[in-house]
Amino acid sequence: MQKNDGSVTRFRVIDTEAYFQMVKLSLAETGSAQVRVTGNSMWPMLHHLRDSVTIIPHGKIRRGDVVLFDRQNGRYALHRVIRTGEQGFTMAGDNQWHVERDLPYAQIVGVVDSMVRNGRSISCSKKSVRFYAWLVTLFTLPRIYLRRAVGKVLKPFRRGRSRV
């Protein structure tokens, strides 16, 4: 990956399961783990390969928290908690249109405590970050339902589709 100044940053690619086993081990031994953000599901808060997050073991999960979730199929998700309940929780990425419901708390690896952006740590307890989380959770479900409704209205006008 080439930077603006011409220097090159090299990334070592390792197996996902091996990587997250190291994350879980670090959580158990030190009480925290640093995880590089990959993907765009949490944009604009977290940027692909630019940002990283500090994960800590979870206690009580609150609406607006960002959690690292083990899907138990070899994939992991770093998404925001939209709703909590006694049996499970609902989560979605800030930049996603899909909500995952009724997820078990037992599959949460940890909760994001802080973000590291350009070498600067930003606490998730900071008022501005909590306010952003509140706004995102407030508008996640309405924005998803609105997008679906607009998609249905515009479906007949999409190029390449027949109007039967």
Image (cartoon, rainbow, N blue to C red):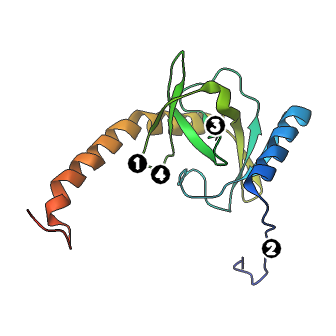
Seen in the picture, residue 89 relative to 23 is either above or below; the reply is above
Residue where numbered disc 3 is placed: 67
Residue where numbered disc 2 is placed: 10
Q: CA distance from mark 3 to mark 4?
A: 15 Å
The percent coordinates of residue 156 (x first, y second) are 14, 62
Question: Is 91 or 48 nearer to us in this picture?
Answer: 91
Task: Mark 3: give few (<14), some (14-19) or many (20+) Cα within 10 Å.
Answer: many
Seen in the picture, residue 64 relative to 34 is either above or below; the reply is above
Task: Mark 2: give few (<14), some (14-19) or many (20+) Cα within 10 Å.
Answer: few
Identify which amino acid the numbered label 1 is placed on: Trp
Q: CA distance from mark 4 to mark 2?
A: 27 Å
Q: Which mark is residue 69?
A: none
Residue at 62% of width from left, 44% of height from top?
Answer: 78
Identify which amino acid the numbered label 4 is placed on: Asn
Residue at 77% of width from left, 57% of height from top?
Answer: 119
Dot 2 falls on a residue whose secondary structure is loop
Q: Earlier in the sequence, mark 1 or mark 3?
A: 3
Q: Earlier in the sequence, mark 3 or mark 4?
A: 3
The percent coordinates of residue 93 (x first, y second) are 51, 45
Q: Are marks 3 and 2 in contact (CB under 8 Å)?
A: no
